[in-house]
Amino acid sequence: MDRDNRPLAEQWHDAAMAHVDAEAAASMLEETKSAVLAEMVSDELRSDPKMSVAKAETTVKASRRWREHVEGIVRARKAANRARVSRDYLKMRFSQWISEDANHRAGARV
C-alpha cells in the first residue's frame, strides 16, 4: 500500500468508500447470478424448444459465457475483500499511531 502524507482519517475514508463501491459491485453480481442463469437457460430453450430445462441448464453451466460470468463474480469479490483489507490496514495504522502517541505522552510526563 502506498503511503501518502494525508491524514490517516482522510486515507481511511477514501479506503472505506472504495470498499463500499467494491462490495456493492460484488454483491450486485452475486445477487443477480440466478437471474443471469435463468436468462441464459431461457435463451437455450428458445433456440431448441424440445430441450429439457435440465439439459439447457447443464449446457449453460458448461459454456464459456457462464464460466466468464462466474469468474467475474469471483474477481469482484476478491476486489471487495482487498478493499476491505486496505481499509482495515489504515484503521490498524491509526490505532497504532494513537497507542504510540499515548506512550510518548506518558513518557514525557515521567
Image: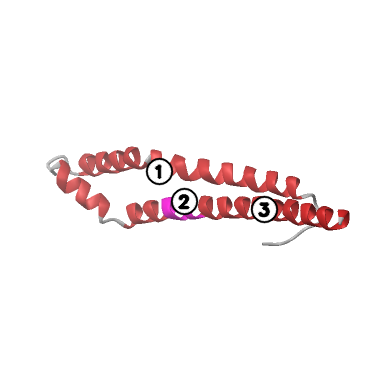
Q: Is residue 104 left or right of residue 32?
A: right
Q: Is residue 43 left or right of residue 53?
A: right
Closer to the chain start, of discs 2 and 1, is 1
Label number found at residue 77: 2
Instruction: State the image coordinates of residue 85 (x, y, percent, origin top left).
Output: 57, 54
> Is there CB contact under 8 Å for labels 3 and 2?
no
Residue nearer the viewer, 96 or 110:
110
Q: Is residue 33 left or right of residue 22?
A: left
**Which SS class for mark 1?**
helix
> Is there CB contact under 8 Å for labels 2 and 1?
yes
Instruction: State the image coordinates of residue 9 (x, y, percent, origin top left).
Output: 74, 45
- How many residues crowd around disc 1 within 10 Å: few (fewer than 14), some, or many (20 or more)? some
Label number found at residue 90: 3
Q: Is residue 26 magenta?
A: no
| 1 or 3: mark nearer the eye | 3
Q: Say what amino acid the circle numbered 2 marks.
A: Arg
Instruction: State the image coordinates of residue 77 (x, y, percent, origin top left).
Output: 46, 51
Instruction: State the image coordinates of residue 1 (x, y, percent, origin top left).
Output: 66, 62
Residue nearer the viewer, 2 or 55:
2
